[in-house]
Image (cartoon, rainbow, N blue to C red):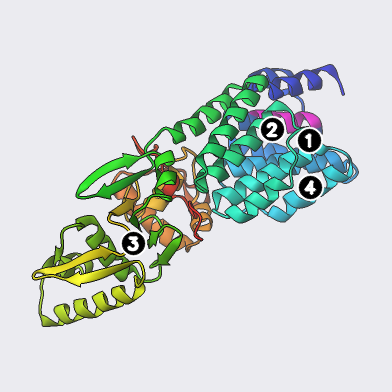
Amino acid sequence: MDSLITAAARALAAGDPLGALNRVALREDATALALRGIAMAQLGDLVRARLLVRRAARAFGLKAAVARARCVVAEAEIAFASRDLGWPAKALDAAREVLDAHGDRINAAHARLLEIRRLLLVGRLDQAEQRLAELDPSPLPPAFNATYQLVSAGIAIRRLTVRVARQAIALAAQAAQQAGIPALTEEVRHAARVLNTPAARLIHRGQTRALLLDEVEALQACAALVVDACHQRVRDGDTRVSLATRPLLFALARELGEAWPADVPREVLITRVFRTRYIDDTHRVRLRVEIGRLRSALKGLAGVNATARGFRLMPLKHAEVMVLAQPVEDRHATLLALLADGESWSSSALALALGISQRSVQRALDGLAAQRKVQTYGHGRARRWITPPTPGFTTTLLLPAPLPTV
């Protein structure tokens, strides 16, 4: 390998894409094309970067299996950065096997980290955690080790094990400092800010206050009946009753929980839960039926007592009732949470991450764009959506599968 290629590779490793381009910008050989592609990716021109990496893979030919595999990994990283979550995972897995078979353990680990980051992004926490446990971070260079720790912190944050997340972020900060890459250092700082930013809201005795992740974690062991709006369930210690498939019952439980220790008038429950302005006897009958179903669902946790004007929630084990609410309650809160990472997303990637149809995502995005909550650029298949982070709140609890459901 000639001196210019070596110098360009070192510049890229140090986070200096312009220095790398100064050395290989006019070259068309396979290695130079690959380095130019990586440099363009670091500069943010992901479309051009992907084209260059593909050209490099073709230029290397079938005989240069390791070099082609490295190009596949680079293209996968570019696809991840551009939120192309539909990129073929099998190609990345095959490239990782080639690199592993030829002794390139570092790039094989990099491919594994990309796979784990994708799993984490789409909310497959169990798979991400399993893959991460199979990866040994000790031989990784500082930059990759920082990424490993950030992924570990991301899983811990979603699992609400905040102490583990803090330890991982501290290790990531040390590794990022050793790597000396400004963008990586900023990514670690952003992860650290998540732990010190309000992540949920607690509604208790008519008062609402913001909670940090540490406080949300502590609430799991709190001696109180908790109406959990993050998962649409009611829990008391280790006993949990999920109402995720019965939204009307959960809406009743939440109204009663927010009003506790007071009762809620029947007219208020009918208006808010049934979403009607015109109340007749059929609504009152329906309310009695649904209250009966709620009593049955919460048996062993709480009772629902009738009062002169309405109903009151009565916890059986503890004397307090609390409501844990999402930090931002919007019809499209999970969609906004994904967009709040600052990256540009395609509607197909958002649909894949949320597990819903692309057409539903497109309708939601059009509505959010009309409200000026999201911005778009590009046309057709190149169209991308972006929004700034929600000020004052972290959107951790809005992401797919944010908390353990057991």
Gap in Å between the C-alphas at discs 4 and 1?
13 Å
x then y, percent, for residue 82:
56, 42
Gap in Å between the C-alphas at discs 3 and 1?
54 Å
Numbered circle sitting on residue 144: 2
Foreground tag (2 vs 4): 2
First reached walking from the N terminus: tag 4 or tag 3: 4
| Residue interval drawn in magenta | 31-39
Give the residue number, with chain letter if any, for mark 1.
106
- The residue type indicated by label 3 comes to Lys
How busy is the neighbourhood of tag 3: few (under 14 within 10 Å), some, or many (20 plus)?
Answer: some
Q: Quick one: 251 or 94, which is closer to the camera?
A: 251
Give the residue number, with chain letter if any, for mark 3.
317
- The residue type indicated by label 1 comes to Ile
Q: Quick one: 91 or 405, which is closer to the camera?
A: 405
Contact, mark 3 vs mark 1 (Cβ under 8 Å): no
How busy is the neighbourhood of tag 2: few (under 14 within 10 Å), some, or many (20 plus)?
Answer: many
First reached walking from the N terminus: tag 3 or tag 1: 1
Gap in Å between the C-alphas at discs 4 and 3?
55 Å
Q: Horizontally, is 267 left or right of 398 in the view?
A: left
Numbered circle sitting on residue 212: none
Foreground tag (3 vs 1): 3
Gap in Å between the C-alphas at discs 1 and 2?
8 Å
First reached walking from the N terminus: tag 4 or tag 1: 4
Give the residue number, with chain letter if any, for mark 4.
95
